[in-house]
């Protein structure tokens, strides 16, 4: 079975541009989360989506947005890129149902390395 | 909210020896979960082991075991018989809360290097 797949693997943009990152979850997983990992730090939570609805948002500006499609794949969009947006963006999927208070593990993709020049 | 602390930025271990990676957590939640992930240079976060707050036994998964001490709020990862392929970044993460989005909160990680 395919794991979580992300595209593209690497991306170079300039300040002020817009970027779209894509993620396909593991088959059967309806929950998709996005994390930002700046070099030398642990990942930081950006969004969680479940069945096309946003279920959680981390402490990120409105320049960051996301959506989930009927096939549970997801896109992360970042507008007006800043140098500080340079990071590894990780997508994770799980079988957890929001609000169920279970501790399903997250399965991560290999990430998209975004460089903003 | 959770806070995860990993105080060892880097660790070295000789091949075939055991190593302990430290993790402490701070949470007011009664029900929570603690996870360890491995991140090789390829970037993917690989799940290693999980411990639930109500689990009485320490979790084990092959060469990985979790030394869970609830009173000390610590969840240290023990890797036995280290292998060269174990060289990677290791993250401790916690999940808790009562909201609909119970996301993982990660520590800053420990870079493990296994020496031949």
Image (tube, coloured by chain):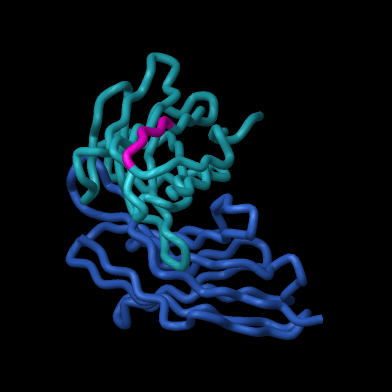
Q: Is any atom of residue A99 visible in this view? A: no
Residue B22 x %, y %: 46, 79
Going by the image, does B74 lie left or right of B60?
Answer: left
Which residue range is magenta in the image?
A16-20
Q: Residue at x 51, y 74 (%)?
A: B110
Kindly give the residue lying farthest to the top in the view shown: A70
Residue A66 x %, y %: 31, 30
Asked whether B23 or B109 is in front, the reply is: B109
Membership of A17 in magenta stretch: yes
Total label count? Answer: 0
Chain B tint as drawn = blue
Q: Residue at x 25, y 42 (%)?
A: B101
Q: Quadrant of residue B39?
A: bottom right
Membership of A69 in magenta stretch: no
Residue A113 x %, y %: 52, 47
Going by the image, does A58 lie left or right of B70?
Answer: left
Going by the image, does B23 lie left or right of B27?
Answer: right
Q: Residue at x 45, y 46 (%)?
A: A89
Chain A tint as drawn = cyan
Q: Name above or below for residue B22 compared with residue A58.
A: below
Q: Quadrant of the N terminus of chain A?
A: top right
Asked whether B22 or B9 is in front, the reply is: B9
């Amino acid at each position: 079975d395919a794991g979580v797949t992300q595209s593209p693997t690497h991306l170079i943009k300039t300040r002020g541009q817009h970027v779209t990152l894509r993620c396909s979850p593991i088959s059967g997983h309806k929950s998709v989360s996005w994390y930002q990992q700046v070099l030398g730090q642990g990942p930081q939570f950006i969004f969680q989506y479940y069945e096309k609805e946003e279920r959680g948002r981390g402490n990120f500006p409105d320049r960051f947005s996301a959506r989930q499609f009927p096939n549970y794949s997801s896109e992360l969009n970042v507008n007006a890129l800043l140098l500080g947006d340079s990071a590894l963006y990780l997508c994770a999927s799980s079988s957890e149902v929001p609000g169920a208070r279970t501790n399903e593990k997250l399965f991560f993709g290999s990430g998209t390395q975004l460089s903003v020049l | 909210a959770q806070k995860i602390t990993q105080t060892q930025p880097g660790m070295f271990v000789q091949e075939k020896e055991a190593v302990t990676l430290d993790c402490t957590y701070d949470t007011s939640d009664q029900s929570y979960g603690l996870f360890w992930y491995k991140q090789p240079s390829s970037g993917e976060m690989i799940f290693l082991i999980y411990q639930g707050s109500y689990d009485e036994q320490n979790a084990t998964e092959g060469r990985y075991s979790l030394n869970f001490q609830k009173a000390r709020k610590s969840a240290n990862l023990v890797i036995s018989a280290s292998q060269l392929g174990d060289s990677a970044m290791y993250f401790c993460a916690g999940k808790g809360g009562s909201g609909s989005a119970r996301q993982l909160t990660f520590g800053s990680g420990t870079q493990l290097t296994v020496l031949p």
